Image (cartoon, helix red, strand yellow):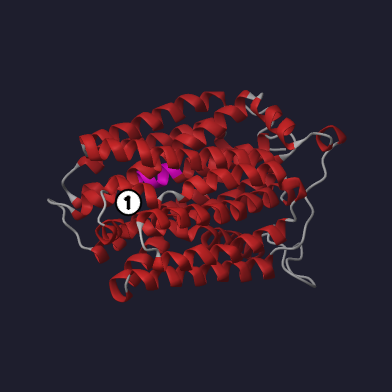
């Protein structure tokens, strides 16, 4: 078995089989967890924050999800300049700085300040996220890449579950301010983990043609590829749908006739537990069935969950949330891995632009679906989610890489 440990930090992309591969996947997943745990944890306390700032669900939803605006900007910027950024130092700095706006949220005096700080969080989270994806894409073999990306997205899934539970528990027992201080400590823990587990590694050297490309030229080259264009748009649609479901369903759950309390709302997010398992299977599913069938199957599962979340039964709503979570995260893992494989050089640019599109979908979804929710109700919001999933399914027809795994 290939050595996982040597003098200096551990290389998270190395490892052989069995225990070594499991440890590698765990470290990759934990890194992802600590990178994006702030992103969706705050959604578990959305009704509480809306009352605290005395604003509408749409206004509070936009403020909380303003982090996706920062993530879209940073994802693109990091992608364009990733060839000049030391991966390890960039990830370390991003997670260290992330602790600052997270802590400042504890004392945000108004919704405008809260929104700005969430944007700043997004800038830091996306920088770390994009650089880690680029690192994995460059340092993993083609066969290992699918599993590495799946492990990373699985950590993302776990952050949705555990982060929301933590937020609900801390706010319920210690208050809003303590919640943000606690999450700033988690950000610092992420920086410590990266320090000990990621080696300093230069961006992978590619052929001279790609080396001579400017970042904008590389982006234009990626955008000329119909498969990559489709993947970027699918990423947009996936988070558009996810945001629409898991932001505004919180307000449905605390209202009559379901009427659960704040701590119960935190426990609702055990609906993400099955996604932790299913998302890990994405790499193997793509390898066996291909990217398009894997994404179509995942989107179909998510779509079948939509009618269930319109029910007045808590059990039916939870079942629908499980299906939507499993489907969207599985599709995201497949699409993320596809971009890493299909990009013919300058993978950092491709991954960064994918993340920019993905998080732009979250930003647009928050605004559009929030207005549908406020003006026309939950059914109209769910219809918007269904439309996004249908568009993603249509776009998947263009995912035709010349070599799935080589």
- Label 1: how many residues lie within 10 Å, few (<14), some (14-19) or many (20+)? many
Does residue 15 appear in the picture of this structure?
A: no
Q: Residue at x 46, y 32 (%)?
A: 296
If the image is split into quadrants, where does the C terminus sit? top right
Is residue 262 placed above or below 173 in the rendered structure? above
Depth check, front residue: 199 or 52: 52
Q: Which residue is mark 1?
A: 60
If the image is split into quadrants, where does the N terminus sit? bottom right
Depth check, front residue: 215 or 160: 215
In magenta stretch: residue 160:
no
Say whether residue 377 is left or right of residue 339. left
Depth check, front residue: 128 or 317: 128
Does residue 163 appear in the picture of this structure?
A: yes
To which quarter of the image does residue 269 belong?
bottom left
**Dominant secondary structure of the residues highlighted in magenta in the image:** helix
Q: Residue furthest left?
A: 257
Q: Residue at x 68, y 45 (%)?
A: 143
- Give the magenta part as a residue range: 322-328
Depth check, front residue: 121 or 224: 121
Say whether residue 291 is left or right of residue 242. right
Residue 343 is situated, as x and y percent measured from the top left of the image, at 69, 35
């Amino acid at each position: 078995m290939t050595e996982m440990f040597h003098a200096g930090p551990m290389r998270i992309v190395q490892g052989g089989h069995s225990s070594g591969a499991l440890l590698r996947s765990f470290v990759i997943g934990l890194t992802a967890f600590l990178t994006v745990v702030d992103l969706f944890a705050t959604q578990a306390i959305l009704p509480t924050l809306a009352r605290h700032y005395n604003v509408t669900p749409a206004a509070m939803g936009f403020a909380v999800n303003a982090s996706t605006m920062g993530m879209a900007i940073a994802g693109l910027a990091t992608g364009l300049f990733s060839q000049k950024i030391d991966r390890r130092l960039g990830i370390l700095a991003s997670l260290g700085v992330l602790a600052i706006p997270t802590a400042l949220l504890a004392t945000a005096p108004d919704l405008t300040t809260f929104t700005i700080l969430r944007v700043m969080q997004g800038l830091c989270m996306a920088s770390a996220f994009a650089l880690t994806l680029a690192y994995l894409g460059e340092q993993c073999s083609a066969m290992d890449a699918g599993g590495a990306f799946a492990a990373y997205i699985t950590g993302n899934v776990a952050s949705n579950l555990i982060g929301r539970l933590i937020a609900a528990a801390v706010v319920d027992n210690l208050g809003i301010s303590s919640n943000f201080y606690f999450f700033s400590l988690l950000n610092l823990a992420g920086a410590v983990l990266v320090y000990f587990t990621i080696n300093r590694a230069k961006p992978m050297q590619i052929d001279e043609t790609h080396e001579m490309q400017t970042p904008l030229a590389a982006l234009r080259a990626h955008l000329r590829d119909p498969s990559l264009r489709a993947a970027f748009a699918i990423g947009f649609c996936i988070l558009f749908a996810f945001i629409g479901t898991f932001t505004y369903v919180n307000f449905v759950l605390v209202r009559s006739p379901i009427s659960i309390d704040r701590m119960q709302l935190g426990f609702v997010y055990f609906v993400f537990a099955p996604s932790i398992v299913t998302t890990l299977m994405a790499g193997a599913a793509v390898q066996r069935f291909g990217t398009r069938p894997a994404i179509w199957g995942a989107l179909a599962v998510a779509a079948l969950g939509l009618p269930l979340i319109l029910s007045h039964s808590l059990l039916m709503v939870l079942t629908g949330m499980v299906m939507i979570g499993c489907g969207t995260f599985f599709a995201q893992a497949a699409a993320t891995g596809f971009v890493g494989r299909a990009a013919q050089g300058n993978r950092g640019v491709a991954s960064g632009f994918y993340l920019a599109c993905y998080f732009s979908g979250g930003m647009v979804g928050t605004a559009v679906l929030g207005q549908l929710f406020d003006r026309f109700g939950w059914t109209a919001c769910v219809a918007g989610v269904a439309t996004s999933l249908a568009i993603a399914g249509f776009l998947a027809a263009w995912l035709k890489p010349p070599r799935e795994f080589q």
